[in-house]
Amino acid sequence: MDKWINIALPKGRLGKKVNDLLRKSGYGYEEPSDDNRKLVLVNEDKKIRFFQVKPSDVTIYVERGAADVGIAGEDIILEHEPDVYELMDLGIGKCRMAEAAPKGWHENSERTLRVATKFPNIARTYFDGENRDIDIIELHGSIELAPIVGLSDVIVDIVETGTTLRENDLEVVETIVQISARLIANKASFQFKTEEIVALRDALAAELWGKGESK
């Protein structure tokens, strides 16, 4: 590779899965020790700098050109609609965006539906498609609490195993969209670093296809 590539990676569980895939593809980095708080990591051989950022910030770094590429959940992409290229579905970090409500709940279609969510744009788009009048209640944590205490009728949130829902006597009413991690690229970077970015994408694709996880 002749040009350096800056990659925005999500912190947390998804970040570990992404780095595992990157390492197997020949593009990874050595994970720092638990007490190391370095935010920029380097793969000298591949000329890659990795930025570790909050998952919801990945699209911002890529859209504004601070990072050439990044790995972001489809939930973040759908919610913020960044002006980037979506290069491929990595098939990891799988979950779903769903509408959930207390068990036994019955909808009253004659009144406005109160919806608690961290994802107002996704929720609004979904219910617009259902021709349903809604009142969006935007929260940033413990979404499941909202219908329990009467703040909302339903929630729209990410469901992975469903354990939290079950433990709070909630259940999925409808799956809105399946979610997984996507490789995205800054549009200008893709024009000027096409060879390097395509090589990265193809290495990831080869690893995934070889395991039959994605195509």
Image: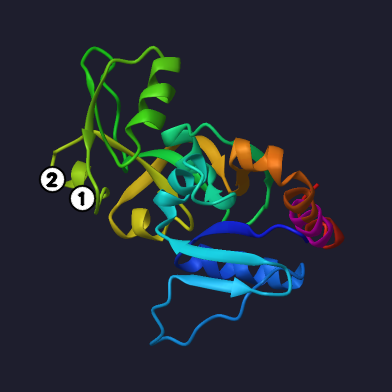
Residue toward you, 158 or 199:
199
Q: Residues within 10 Å of mark 2 (few under 14, many from 20)?
A: few
Q: Is residue 141 left or right of residue 27?
A: left
- Tell me what residue is drawn at x 21 percent, y 50 percent: 145
Q: What secondary structure predominates along the stretch shown in magenta?
A: helix
Q: Amino acid at mark 2?
A: Val
Element on which disc 2 rests: loop
Q: Position of residue 42 (x, y in %)?
A: 59, 73
Q: Is residue 36 left or right of residue 177?
A: left
Mark 2 sits on what residue? 149
Residue toward you, 139 or 151:
139
Q: Amino acid at mark 1?
A: Leu
Q: Position of residue 56 (x, y in %)?
A: 40, 50
Instruction: Please give the range of residues in magenta.
Output: 200-207
Q: Are marks 1 and 2 in contact (CB under 8 Å)?
A: yes
Mark 1 sits on what residue? 145
